[in-house]
Image (spheres, rainbow, N blue to C red):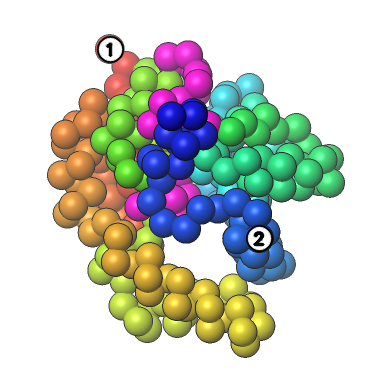
Amino acid sequence: MQATAIARWRFKGPEMEGVVARWYARIRGTGSQIGAYRKEAERLTGTLPEGSKVLEVAFGPGYLAIEVARLGRVQVTGLDISHTFVKIASQNARDAGVSADFRQGDAAVMPFAAESFDLIVCQAAFKNFVHPGSALSEMHRVLRAGGTAVIQDMSSDASHADIEKEVKGMQLGRVSSFTTKGTLEMLKRRAYSPAKFARLAAESPFQTCAITTEGIGLEVRLHKPVA
């Protein structure tokens, strides 16, 4: 079996290649969302020392990683299973005039040395990993002691009203709003609840985690202590 086939087998949900990836890049790239990515980049990296290394797992169109790179204080690397997203994100970074190393690869078998990064971020993708335990183990392996992995994703506890509010804030057109709401309702079925993610973290090398919820989402923080 070819490596690309193995990688795709490790990702559940629609294949983010070609027209699907380009559609996703378009609906996630509105002005209001880019503004939100910019604020999130500042929040996530504000306490990192100058020169820290940040990895975004499943970076998609690269909007968050680009906003992190735009701050100019840290080195940014991205890893995504999608060949199309690597091309889209790389072009977006060039257009933004920032430096970010976007690579194609599997979150369950990361092509990085141990203790390579100070911060790992994964947004809106973890629920799609076929081998979530392996992904957490890999995050722990490539994270430096004292570092943190932050996983942000949809919560299975999200209500229909939460989804309506989320999509409204994206400032999409009528057709895109309709399809996006339908997509989120579908994705909710395989999302994690806080309790389920806590059990998954307990079985990982991290052992513990801190979980907060807001709107449709949950944020999981996993810390790798200094030995």
Q: How crowded is mark 1: few (under 14 residues within 10 Å), some or many (20 or more)?
A: few
- Position of the N terminus by quadrant: top left
Query: Looking at the picture, does residue 149 appear above or below residue 154?
Result: above
Looking at numbered disc 2 in the image, what kind of residue is underneath it?
Val
Dot label at residue 159? none
Query: Looking at the picture, does residue 25 appear above or below residue 84?
Result: below
The residue that appears at 62% across and 87% down in the rendered structure is: 174
Of residues 213 and 65, which is closer to you in this image? Answer: 65
- Looking at this view, name the residue that lies furthest to the front: 1
Q: What element carries label 2?
A: helix
- Position of the C terminus by quadrant: top left
* 165 lies left or right of 66: left
Horizontal and vertical percent position of residue 33: 63, 64
Looking at numbered disc 1 in the image, what kind of residue is underneath it?
Ala
- Residue 25 in view: no
State yes or no: discs 1 and 2 in contact (Cβ < 8 Å). Answer: no
Quadrant in the rendering for residue 101: top right
The residue that appears at 32% across and 16% down in the rendered structure is: 226
Horizontal and vertical percent position of residue 106: 46, 33
Of residues 98 and 6, which is closer to you in this image? Answer: 6
Q: Which of marks 1 and 2 is nearer the N terminus?
A: 2
The residue that appears at 33% across and 67% down in the rendered structure is: 188
Q: What element carries label 1?
A: loop
Whole-number angstrom distance, CA of label 1 to CA of label 2? 46 Å
Q: Residue beneath label 1, please?
A: 227
Q: Residue beneath label 2, please?
A: 19
Magenta stretch, residue numbers: 105-128
Q: How many labels does the image show?
A: 2
Of residues 25 and 40, which is closer to you in this image? Answer: 25
